[in-house]
Image (cartoon, grey):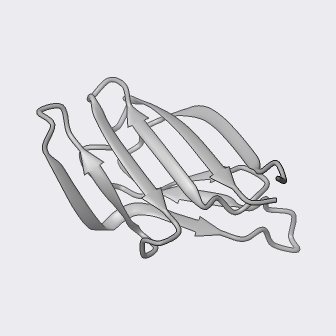
């Protein structure tokens, strides 16, 4: 079995889209807003800019905008990765987002 790619990190929420460079195109992304107690999960079976969101009370919802979008690297030197959309529960200004991304080699 081949090893896949895996990356983790943290970013501060901005309320606007955030670009995360991983060096590969993820097939799964999980984002935890540890200050707002909210989780967003996305995988490559879901459309771009979507995700499954769980908020503190345990309520889940499939979002169809302001979720996760994967992008390929460019010849200009930008690394492949994903964008965290501006969802108002996940990407809150000054709240810490912990993310993990998995992909195929």
Residue 55 in the image, given as x and y percentages of width and height: 20, 39
Residue 73 in the image, given as x and y percentages of width and height: 78, 68
Looking at the image, which residue sits at the far top?
35
Nearer to me, 12 or 65: 65
**Residue 91 appearing in the image:** no
Image position of 14 (left or right of 81): left
Residue 68 versus residue 30 in the image, above or below: below
Residue at 82% x, 48% y is: 3
Residue 69 in the image, given as x and y percentages of width and height: 51, 66
The total number of labels drawn is: 0
Residue at 45% x, 42% y is: 31
Nearer to me, 69 or 62: 62
What is the quadrant of the C terminus in the image? bottom right
**Residue 55 appearing in the image:** yes
Looking at the image, which residue sits at the far front?
1
Residue at 28% x, 50% y is: 53
Image position of 48 (left or right of 24): left
Residue 8 location, quadrant: top right
Nearer to me, 69 or 75: 69
Residue 32 versus residue 54 in the image, above or below: above
Residue at 52% x, 51% y is: 29
Residue 104 versus residue 8 in the image, above or below: below
Image position of 60 (left or right of 30): left
């Amino acid at each position: 079995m081949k090893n896949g790619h895996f990356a983790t990190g943290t970013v501060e929420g901005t309320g606007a889209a955030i670009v995360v460079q991983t060096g590969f195109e993820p097939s799964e992304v999980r984002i935890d807003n540890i200050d707002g107690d909210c989780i967003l999960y996305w995988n490559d079976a879901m459309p771009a800019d979507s995700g499954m969101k769980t908020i503190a009370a345990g309520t889940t919802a499939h979002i169809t905008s302001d979720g996760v979008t994967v992008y390929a690297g460019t010849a200009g030197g930008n690394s492949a990765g994903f964008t965290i959309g501006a969802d108002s529960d996940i990407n809150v200004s000054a709240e810490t987002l912990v993310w993990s991304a998995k992909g195929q080699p």
